[in-house]
Image (cartoon, rainbow, N blue to C red):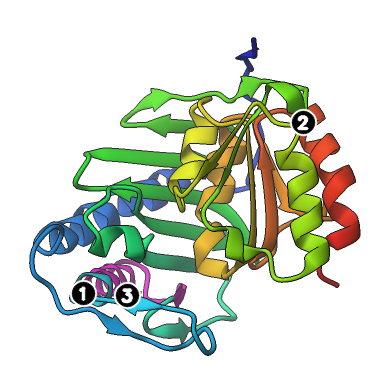
Amino acid sequence: MCAEASIITDSADIPAAELDAYVALLHRLCDASGDVIKRYFRQPVEVLDKADKGPGVYSPVTKADRGAEKAIRALINESFPDHGIIGEEYGVENLDAEYVWVIDPIDGTKAFITGFTAWGTLIALWKNGRAVLGALNQPFAGERFIGVPGQTTLNGEVLGTRACGRLEQARLGITEMDMMHTDAQSRAFDAIASKVEYLRLGGDCYNYALLAAGHIDLVIEGDLKVWDIQALIPIVEGAGGIITLWDGAPVHDGGWVVAAGDKALHTQAVALLKAAAPG
């Protein structure tokens, strides 16, 4: 059986007073977006297909997504007008700024429109292109995961990943199998999935939060956008986990991502994934 791992500390080179101000804003952003989203969840709401992911790929959006991002952007512009913003629904502002907020107003919109709770608002803060703060807010469930340098919390309770160094003992998560775009990627994923104790389909952003909480050991996904993953990097790392691209490189934007609660488990996964990593 896998045991609980200790938390790894880190430094983001942000003065304490600044860090406190950004975390305070992060909570306000979660509150404001959550107020918007809750009005629409499990209610009749128009769903549009953005058709932004190619032929035959369903990409839904609702008033909840767009309203939540507008609320987040308004508060950022009011509080730190010199900061930049990247958002899924409304694009980029001031991208050359030292600090840039990265927003996915609802990660898991397919779950949202079908009434499932495996969705969340993702908000990251970059400093010079590196995610240093991250939040996953689920207002319906009342769960807020916050990752800061060296620590991840759920509603204020400190989390830690599990020590699980063998694939045969691991719980693996992936949102959709069609994230694997090539035969090589499918074979690499299957080589891991055939070894693990349990494979769980679905979950979206929640897979990474549950990894930070020690319930999932490994997450392998592909074709993620920058807003899909940046908020989850501080959440995974703050709980003692490791998150990289399939070849072990840092996740600077999106891409094909592997996250593990245990470094030894990550090493085993990367060994099987790296040959199929997109160039």
Q: Is residue 68 magenta?
A: yes
Q: Earlier in the sequence, mark 2 or mark 1?
A: 1
The residue indicated by pointer 1 is 67
**Which three-letter amino acid code belongs to the residue tagged 3?**
Asn
Residue 42, quarter of the rendered image: bottom left
- In the image: residue 274, left or right of residue 92: right
Rounded to the nearest angstrom, the CA distance separating label 3 from label 2 is 41 Å
* Residue depicted at 61% across the width and 21% down the height: 162
* Residue depicted at 22% across the width and 39% down the height: 142
In percent of width and height, residue 16 lies at 49, 41
Task: Identify the secondary structure beneath mark 1.
Answer: helix
Front-most of 48 and 267? 48
The residue indicated by pointer 2 is 265
Q: Which mark is residue 77?
A: 3
In percent of width and height, residue 116 lies at 27, 50
Question: Depth-wise, is mark 3 or mark 2 nearer the camera?
Answer: 2
Q: Is residue 268 magenta?
A: no
- In the image: residue 165, left or right of residue 4: right
In percent of width and height, residue 275 lies at 91, 58
